[in-house]
Amino acid sequence: MRLIRAVLSVLLSDAVDDGIILANAALQLRGSRRRRPDSISQAERQKKIRPMNHGQLAAFLATAQADSRHYPLFLLLARTGLRPGEAYALQWGDLDLRGREIRVERSLSAGQIETPKTGQTRTVDMSEQLARTLRRLEIDRMVEKLRLGWQEMPLWIFCTDVGTPLDESRVRRPSPRRSSERSFPDSASTTSVTRSRHCSWPRTRPSPT
């Protein structure tokens, strides 16, 4: 059964890349099997997440700069504290680059667009570094639009080669280049660990209604 799921997951991931489907539904099959006595719950797994310290995060982001497609995502998670699903669901219209603000009003979960976990829209400040990085990404996306022959710019800030939203299965963890970078926490997904480093000091406020 495990081999069947693995093969199915590869096929569906290719379909996501080709724009045939929005997300890899096979990733959800992991939670449907019978729980083993020695397995842990999602809540227990969350407790085991070890966020990066400042040195690890700086080294991680320095390494991630080599991946121009995913570096803006990692930087956004590290600097804003957004949940991964909220970051994947961001659209260009949610950004105010001049005012350096991000409006968070949706989240991507299992291929479905939902409201944020908090149940309400909020506004998050972005650093000058993040604003510059996202502005550069927007310019790169315009170039990519011409190169790939897209009729329109994809709505999603973080998207695949066919303009569909990224999800956890499509984000690669940067490979450490130096021995000092090999201590990155590996007990959870890279996006979750990167985001959790910021969660003790996020600057957010509810959006005006």
Image (tube, rainbow, N blue to C red):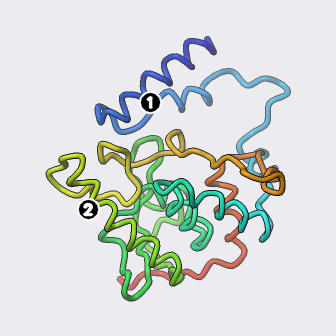
Q: Indicate the amino acid at tag 2.
A: Met
Which disc number belongs to residue 48?
none
In percent of width and height, residue 166 lies at 43, 47
**The N terminus: image quadrant:** top right
Residue at image coords 73%, 63%: 59
Residue kind at label 1, given as amino acid type? Ser
Front-lying residue, 92 or 109: 92
Helix, strand or loop at label 2? It is helix
30 in relation to 144, above or below: above
Q: Residues within 10 Å of mark 2 (few under 14, many from 20)?
A: some
Report which quarter residue 38 is drawn in.
top right
Which residue matches tag 1?
13
The answer to whether residue 8 is left or right of residue 156 is right
Quadrant of image for the C terminus: bottom left
Judging depth in this view, the residue of 141 and 107 nearest the camera is 141
Q: Position of residue 124 (x, y in %)?
A: 50, 78
The nearer-to-camera label among 1 and 2 is 2
Q: Is residue 11 left or right of residue 138?
A: right
Q: Position of residue 50 (x, y in %)?
A: 80, 56
Residue wearing tag 2: 142
* Residue lying at the far bottom of the rendered structure: 99
Q: Residue at x 54, y 67 (%)?
A: 76
| Left or right for 90, reference 186 | left
In primary-sequence order, the first of circles 1 and 2 is: 1
Left/right placement of residue 182 relative to residue 195 reads: right
